[in-house]
Image (cartoon, grey):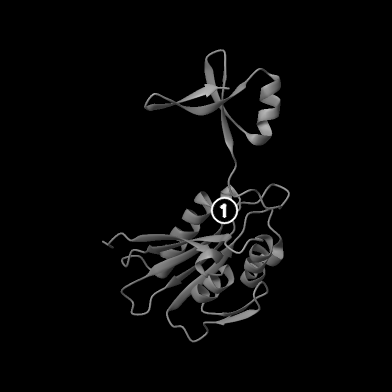
Amino acid sequence: MAIYHMQAKVVSRGSGRSAVAASAYMSCSRMYNDYDGIQHDYTRKQGLIYQEVMLPPMAPLEWNDREQLWNAVEENEKTKDSRLAREFVVALPVELDKGSNISLLQDFIKKNFVDMGMCADFAIHDTDGHNPHAHILLTVRPLNENGTWQYKTEKEYLCIKDGEEKGFTASEFKTAQKQGWEKQYRYKVGKKKEYLTS
């Protein structure tokens, strides 16, 4: 049976990386990055077995072209240290054939990422026939039902009402506040930290 291996990374401008370059590398292709004007050419790289872009139903159809997808991500992120994508490298069972590994990956990516609104770009590599592995590149921001990017993270406030605690997102808090929920803050009481209302 295959030895388990999974590596997770963040593709970030802060570390000098580009989502377009990461996608070009894993798909062994040539792609132009509109953000910085650099052409990334990995067409001489060997070992590509399969590649695919998986999109949620609300994503624009032109994003099936990975160059357009990752350039849209790069365009949406404005800061010089933006997190652009999540990248996973996963070992695949050598005992399974190519078709089974593809099905396994498609099912895993759909259930865990695409169904949550993320766009996924993946490729299977194996240079010597003994090391099948997949590179999975995911958008950091999921898409809303209307096809617009969501926030990367969303604040949640721990609130209290009549002794009951509940979390509310920033957008939900205004309504909750009208219903009598009070925001709690973290205070240091002696050596312990406790959540209390202001």
Q: Secondary structure at mark 1?
A: helix
Report the residue that reaches farthest toward the top: 162
Report the residue that reaches farthest toward the bottom: 44
Q: x and y percent of residue 142 in the render?
A: 61, 51
Q: Which residue is mark 1?
A: 114
Seen at 63% across and 48% down, the residue is 151
Res. 154 image quadrant: top right
Number of marks in the rendered image: 1
Residue 130 visible in the displayed image: yes
Q: x and y percent of residue 95 in the render?
A: 31, 66
Q: x and y percent of residue 186 in the render?
A: 50, 29
Res. 161 image quadrant: top right
Amino acid type of the residue tagged 1 in the rendering:
Val
Seen at 58% across and 65% down, the residue is 53
Residue 12 visible in the displayed image: no
Name above or below for residue 28 compared with residue 133: below
Q: x and y percent of residue 30 in the render?
A: 58, 81
Q: Is residue 167 left or right of residue 92?
A: right
Q: Crowding near pointer 1: few (<14 within 10 Å), some, many (20+)? A: many
Q: Quadrant of the N terminus?
A: bottom left
Q: Quadrant of the C terminus?
A: top right
Foreground: 70 or 102?
A: 70
Name above or below for residue 53 compared with residue 159: below
Name above or below for residue 144 compared with residue 176: below
Q: Is residue 94 left or right of residue 194?
A: left
Report the residue that reaches farthest toward the right: 146
